[in-house]
Amino acid sequence: MRVFIHNSSYNFANSYIVGPDGPGDALIIDPVGLDVPLLELIENHRYYVRTVLLTTVRQQTVHGVRTLKRVYDAEIYSGYPQVFEFSSRGVERRQTLDLPGVSVEAIPLQHYSRYSLVFRMCGIVFTGIMMSAGLIGERHAEAERLLLAQALRETLTPLPDETVVFPVLGPPSTLGAERRFNADLQVPRTSDFCERHQDSYA
């Protein structure tokens, strides 16, 4: 199995191609755009994209879906039953997807959003826009941010430190580095929470 990172010139976000060592069927995670360099990467390795995995359905992650579907007859998996005008295999619970050449664990971020997913395969997790190196990936109101942080901690805690993290935004990381340096993945102490919110009760 090979993993290729493509940073789109459209919004400087990452898409990922996962395929075999030789020609064959491949999958793409979060197609932020299907530009010429990405198409050349796919075609030069003689891949055919059979599967699209979406961590969430936001402009940053689905911009390239329509173009991709015009080129490849790919099946979509996401937390939604439909993406644009295309049907999607909705993932509503933790499950293993047996895809061409690879098994992928789809993990909904419970307590935050059942429509947001983390995908895990072969020592790698794809976190979409939910988490990037050192940061929770999106700007949220504080309450929503705490729910996202809790969901990520519950999802990622059982995984080993050497697990590689591939986000939509920013460079790759590892769970070991995130546990050490990402404050959002550290369990907040009650006193810390109260100090941050003391103005709300004044």
Image (cartoon, grey):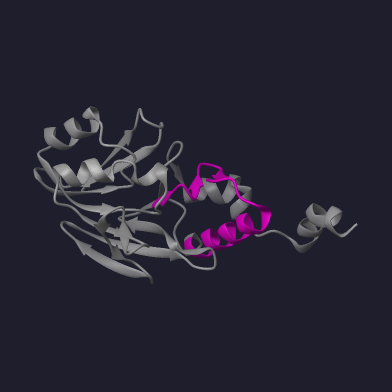
Q: Is residue 126 above or below residue 189?
A: above
Answer with the quarter of the image where residue 88 lies: bottom left
Q: Is residue 106 above or below residue 195?
A: below
Is 70 in front, or is 98?
A: 70
Where in the figure is residue 142, as x and y percent of width and height?
A: 67, 54
In-image side of 6 versus 47 (left or right): right
Residue 171, image x and y in percent? 44, 36
- The part of the image, by quadrant, that contains residue 191 is bottom right
Quadrant in which the C terminus appears: bottom right
User: In this rendering, would 113 be left or right of 198?
Assistant: left
- Image point 41% across, 44% down: which residue? 59
Segment colored magenta: 126-155
Residue 36 appears at what percent x and percent y? 22, 28
Most distant residue in the right direction: 202
Residue 167 appears anywhere in the view: no
Q: Is residue 35 visible?
A: yes
Is residue 149 shown in magenta? yes
Which of 116/17 is in front? 116
Q: Is residue 143 above or below residue 182?
A: below
User: Quick check: 17 left or right of 48?
Assistant: right
Percent from the top left, x then y, of residue 46? 9, 39
Residue reaching furthest to the front: 85
Identity of the residue drawn at 34% across and 32% down: 8
Query: Viewer-proximal residue, 20 or 33?
Result: 33
